[in-house]
């Protein structure tokens, strides 16, 4: 504890870092306040009586920090921007023109502009859907249901998304950490104190103190496992070719030994998000078929995260999407070309295509355990709910919530470590840096 206090003093003693942290906290506070400002023409009391959020709506509400169910001006949160960013990222992989733009500084600026324009379109579309599919079915939610309300609400929701996007970019540029990720994490963890309080109240009221202690121990174990999954890397040894520099006083440089860190979970939390979004489709279909049919019962079981069928399908989808998304974002051929261009090589492997094949084969092998552990993390909330954990607290036993929280916190610690190490301070971690940080930028 003493060392931790000393590290906090070191962080606070660096003026630039202190200002960045204060700015980040201030912008986060502004964002949290915005999640409670209700849209004009909405009755918040009617919304409070309809807090049943499942499937994709629950996922959006989680990312929006509860603003979705509150009918707030920031109800869409940053999801339209994330959707636009994912689309542009996939376009850069599929479309050669976008791939060329991503390799140039001016091209990346153009892609950022395209992403912002696409965000406006996506936000306007989602704002219309928000009114039609969420607000209107709730009795008494809309006070004045007319064209003016519809147009003004779509404009306000779109402006709210752009405001959240601006907050995220300001945090990234002037604050500390990745702004968009921090806003998502704050929204998710904003429900954590209430979930813990509800769990304590429930278990103490049922006289299950021992069960509560076991829950807390398992929760800590899950956190440790998620940190290991997020930070786990496979290090490939790397050498740099020796060169002779100079004529009169020839100097030999190079020959340094380093490594390429391949992350066990390169896909991050995206496979879980894709799987959850896909599993929302059966629930929609079940509402359109006969309620007493076997097909409807099976489809409804796929919308309940505590059923065996849901967890099996969910785990398979997470594994498949992990391989799919890793294949999209990881290019061993480009990595091999960069190594060759930098006069570096893997010992015992020829440069060029053999290096690409070697890196690709290792990535395929380490992706399997990463995908399995990611699937396990995804179904843990359902298992926790089956074991008697309250619905609010069970969502933090892995899944999207804690994976995002762990990843963002570790990334923010890395940035703080960079400021400390530049000024001859020790890092926040015992080793001076967070494990898994890339030693080679390719």
Image (tube, rainbow, N blue to C red):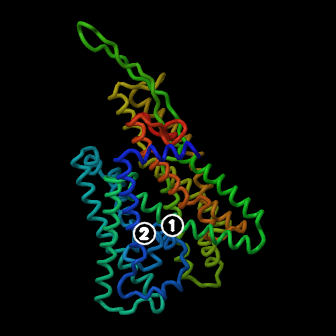
For mark 1, does the 10 Å Cα neighbourhood hold few (<14), some (14 to 19), or many (20 or more) residues?
some
Image height check: is 80 above or below 156? above
Residue identified by numbered label 1: 190
Identify the image quadrant of residue 194. bottom right
Residue furthest top in the image: 248
| Horizontal and vertical percent position of residue 391 | 63, 71
Task: Describe residue 26's horizontal placement relative to residue 301 as left or right.
Answer: left
Q: Quadrant of the C terminus?
A: top left
| Horizontal and vertical percent position of residue 297 | 64, 77
Image height check: is 109 above or below 255? below
| Label 2: element kind | helix
Viewer-side residue, 423 vs 62 = 423
| Horizontal and vertical percent position of residue 229 | 57, 47
Q: Residue at x 62, y 49 (%)?
A: 225
- Comes first in the chain, label 2 or label 1: 2
For mark 2, does the 10 Å Cα neighbourhood hold few (<14), some (14 to 19), or many (20 or more) residues?
many
Q: Residue at x 47, y 62 (%)?
A: 186
Q: Which labelled disc corresponds to residue 242?
A: none
Viewer-side residue, 116 vs 212 = 212
Q: Is there CB contact under 8 Å for labels 2 and 1?
A: yes
Identify the image quadrant of residue 254. top left
| Label 1: element kind | loop
Identify the image quadrant of residue 379. bottom right
Number of marks in the image?
2
How far, Cα to Cα, is label 2 from label 1? 9 Å
Residue furthest left in the image: 106
Viewer-side residue, 258 vs 351 = 258
Task: Describe residue 286's horizontal placement relative to residue 418 as left or right.
Answer: right
Viewer-side residue, 171 vs 4 = 4
Residue identified by numbered label 2: 32
| Horizontal and vertical percent position of residue 233 | 53, 39
């Amino acid at each position: 504890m003493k060392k931790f206090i000393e590290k906090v003093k070191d962080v606070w003693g660096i003026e630039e870092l202190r200002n960045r942290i204060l700015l980040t906290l201030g912008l986060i506070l502004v964002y949290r306040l915005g999640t409670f400002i209700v849209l004009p023409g909405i009755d918040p009391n009617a919304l409070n009586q309809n807090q049943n959020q499942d499937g994709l709506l629950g996922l959006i509400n989680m990312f929006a920090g509860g603003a979705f169910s509150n009918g707030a001006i920031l109800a869409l949160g940053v999801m339209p921007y994330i959707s636009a960013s994912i689309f542009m990222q996939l376009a850069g992989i599929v479309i050669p023109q976008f791939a060329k733009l991503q390799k140039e500084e001016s091209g990346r600026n153009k892609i950022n502009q395209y992403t912002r324009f696409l965000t406006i379109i996506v936000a306007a579309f989602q704002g219309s859907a928000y009114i039609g599919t969420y607000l209107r079915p709730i009795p008494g939610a809309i006070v004045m249901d007319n064209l003016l309300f519809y147009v003004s609400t779509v404009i306000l929701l779109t402006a709210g998304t752009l405001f959240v996007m601006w907050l995220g970019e300001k945090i990234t540029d002037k604050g500390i950490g990745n702004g968009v990720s921090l806003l998502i994490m704050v929204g998710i963890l904003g429900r954590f104190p209430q979930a813990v309080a509800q769990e304590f109240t429930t278990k103490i009221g049922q006289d299950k103190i021992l069960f509560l202690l076991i829950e807390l121990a398992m929760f800590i174990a899950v956190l440790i496992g998620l940190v290991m999954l997020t930070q786990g890397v496979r290090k490939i040894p790397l050498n740099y070719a020796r060169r002779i520099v100079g004529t009169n006083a020839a100097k030999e440089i190079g020959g340094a030994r380093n490594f390429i860190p391949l992350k066990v979970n390169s896909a991050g939390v995206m496979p879980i998000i894709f799987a959850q979004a896909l599993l929302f489709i059966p629930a929609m279909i079940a509402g359109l078929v006969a309620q007493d049919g076997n097909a409807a019962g099976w489809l409804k079981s796929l919308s309940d995260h505590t059923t065996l069928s849901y967890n099996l399908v969910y785990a398979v989808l997470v594994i498949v999407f992990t391989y799919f998304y890793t294949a999209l974002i990881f290019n061993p051929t480009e990595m091999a070309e960069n190594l060759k261009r930098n006069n570096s090589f893997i010992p015992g492997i020829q440069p060029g295509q053999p290096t690409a094949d070697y890196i690709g084969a290792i990535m395929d092998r380490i992706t399997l355990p990463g995908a399995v552990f990611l699937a396990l993390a995804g179904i843990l909330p359902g298992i926790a709910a089956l074991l008697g954990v309250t619905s609010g607290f069970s969502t933090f036993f892995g899944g999207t919530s804690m994976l995002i929280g762990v990843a963002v916190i570790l990334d923010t610690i890395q940035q703080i470590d960079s400021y400390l190490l530049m000024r001859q301070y020790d890092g926040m971690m015992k080793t001076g840096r967070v494990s898994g940080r890339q030693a080679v930028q390719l």
